Amino acid sequence: NAGVTQTPKFQVLKTGQSMTLQCAQDMNHNSMYWYRQDPGMGLRLIYYSASEGTTDKGEVPNGYNVSRLNKREFSLRLESAAPSQTSVYFCATGGLLDSRNQPQHFGDGTRLSIL
Amino acid sequence: RKEVEQDPGPFNVPEGATVAFNCTYSNSASQSFFWYRQDCRKEPKLLMSVYSSGNEDGRFTAQLNRASQYISLLIRDSKLSDSATYLCVVNTNAGKSTFGDGTTLTVKP
């Protein structure tokens, strides 16, 4: 019963390198989200996908791209990593029940350091 | 003004104390409300939903005041293991979830 699985769990990059963070869910939720959380700070929404085939910008989308590959998978790509993108990245999923948003479920996070 | 605001704390309380957190929200169209718990550098986990009539889960009580647009979380008989950051979440029926920045609680022996 995996729920929300993120890979990798840790990654160190050099400035300018690119990488893709993967997220997969087996909860059959329509909505998926990417957040970043800097030390001592709250969650900030990067991008979200309300359903397969749609993506929308969140609060801090600059420097990131996303792909909603299918209902299960939502990836986050850093095209040219910068030290300011050092953070913990969380993927989350959410569903609708009776037209109301249900609580989101989070993956374990990816701890990303950019040197 | 942020859509969801919480007192960041920290709240430092002795074991056995009762502590309460408030969270205010600005969007009157908000439909559903939740409290999450987040341990240091780990993922947020759902603690409890907040229902209009108020609800209780063991030592935890959540309440909603729509008129004043705030939700609260009361923790009775605090345990050391309650030390964490507590996040409130407000959802609109437009599919948007907004997280507060969290309130940090430290329970001391």
Image (cartoon, coloured by chain):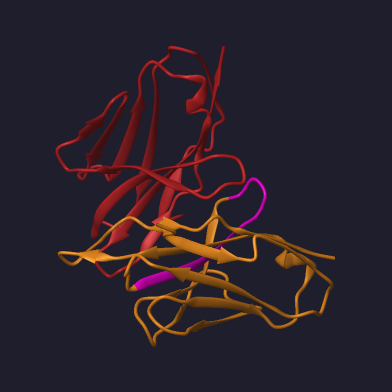
Please say whether residue A37 is one of the residues in the magenta stretch: yes
Compared to B87, does B105 lie above or below? above
Q: Nearer the viewer, residue A22 or B2?
A: A22
Q: Residue at x 52, y 20 (%)?
A: B80
Compared to B24, does B94 lie above or below? below
Residue closest to the far front: A1
Q: Colour of chain A?
A: orange
Tell whether B49 sits left or right of B53.
right
Across and down, in percent, residue A52 comes to 37, 83
Please say whether residue B70 is one of the residues in the magenta stretch: no
Compared to A47, does A52 lie above or below? below
Q: Residue at x 85, y 65 (%)?
A: A115
Across and down, in percent, residue B109 comes to 57, 11
Q: Residue at x 40, y 57 (%)?
A: A1
Q: Residue at x 39, y 88 (%)?
A: A53
Across and down, in percent, residue A25 comes to 42, 68
Residue closest to the far bottom: A53
Q: Nearer the viewer, residue A28 or A31?
A: A28
Q: Nearer the viewer, residue A6 or B62?
A: A6
| Predominant secondary structure, magenta span | strand
Name the quadrant containing residue B62: top left
Residue B45, visible in the rendered structure: yes
Magenta stretch in the rendered image: A31-41
Residue B1, visible in the rendered structure: no
Q: Which chain is red?
A: B
Across and down, in percent, residue B33 comes to 29, 49
Question: Count the marks: how many?
Answer: 0
